[in-house]
Amino acid sequence: MSRPLDDILFGAPSLRAQAVLRTMNWTAAAVLLVLAAGVALQFHAAGQLDARFWEFFAWPTTWSFLARGLLGTMASAAMAAVIALTLGLVLLVGRLARWRLLRWPSVAVIEFLRGTPTLLLIYVCFLVLPQVGIKLSTYWMLTLPIALSTAAVVAEVYRAGVLAVPRGQTEAARSLGMTGAQVFFSIVFPQALRYIVPALVAQLVIVVKDTTFGYVVTYGELMQNAKVLIANYHSLVPVYLIVALLYCLVNYAISRASRWLGRPMH
């Protein structure tokens, strides 16, 4: 007897499916382990794992230099995230507005920013704006383009969450005499946030990774400082391994924070 489509898509996997998934997971883990071992052997053969390429990590000055870069990364990413989350909400309100004069410009801004590469926006801030007399610091040359690019995506993420809220919630709030703004900000939007936490976390991770474009404007973020270490000590692989680990830790912290924020309230 065939299972209903909803049961197949959303129901718990059968025992056979669970066994297949476990086998696939173990197989994928084994393949990744073999690939990692092969890469490590290649690095060792090239001499990149020799002790002389790691010894400067025992110096406090090295970690202090990396810490300054990490702080620069976090400062840019945090500000870009705040701007993007706020501007994304503004664009969402315009996107859902009834008045065309407000809705159409919002749609145009969202589509333009979403379709324009972040790197191109950085070059605009770095090369074009100074030509018209607008001079930004390297911090804002990096942060502002990332924020604008992310805001457009966040606006669409917000919209997906709002559309996922059952329409009956809006109708019930309207029947109680609440205004449109009260319905949106008190009823609809708080519920929408519960649907979009994973997507927002993914965007915050992308924001952190986009800060690596700081090399364009010579902003002192983590990757920029890593390149300085590589140039001074010729330690390509060890430096990038440490930097990759730091990025993973930052993104893991973001993921854990999102789980704490998304936990059910009692």
Image: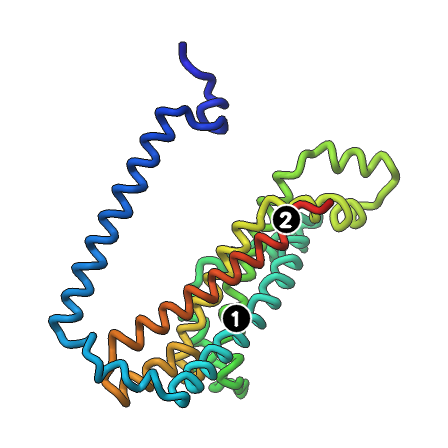
- Judging by the rendered image, the residue that carries numbered circle 2 is 263
Q: Name the residue under label 1.
A: 77
Q: Which of marks 1 and 2 is in front?
A: 2
**Residue at left offset 34%, top offset 73%:** 242
Amino acid type shown at disc 2: Arg
Residue reaching furthest left? 45
What is the crowding at mark 2: few (fewer than 14 residues within 10 Å), some, or many (at least 20)? few
Mark toward the start of the polypeptide (1 vs 2) = 1
Instruction: Looking at the picture, tell me which residue is in the foreground, 248 or 22.
Output: 22
Q: What is the three-letter code of the residue carrying label 1?
A: Ala
Residue that lies at the very extreme toward the right in this rendered image: 177
Q: Can residue 112 be seen in this view?
A: no
Label 1 sits on a secondary structure element that is helix
Residue count near mark 1 (Cα–Cα under 10 Å), binned few <14, some 14–19, many ≥20: many
Residue 108 position (above or below residue 161): below
Whether residue 210 is visible:
yes
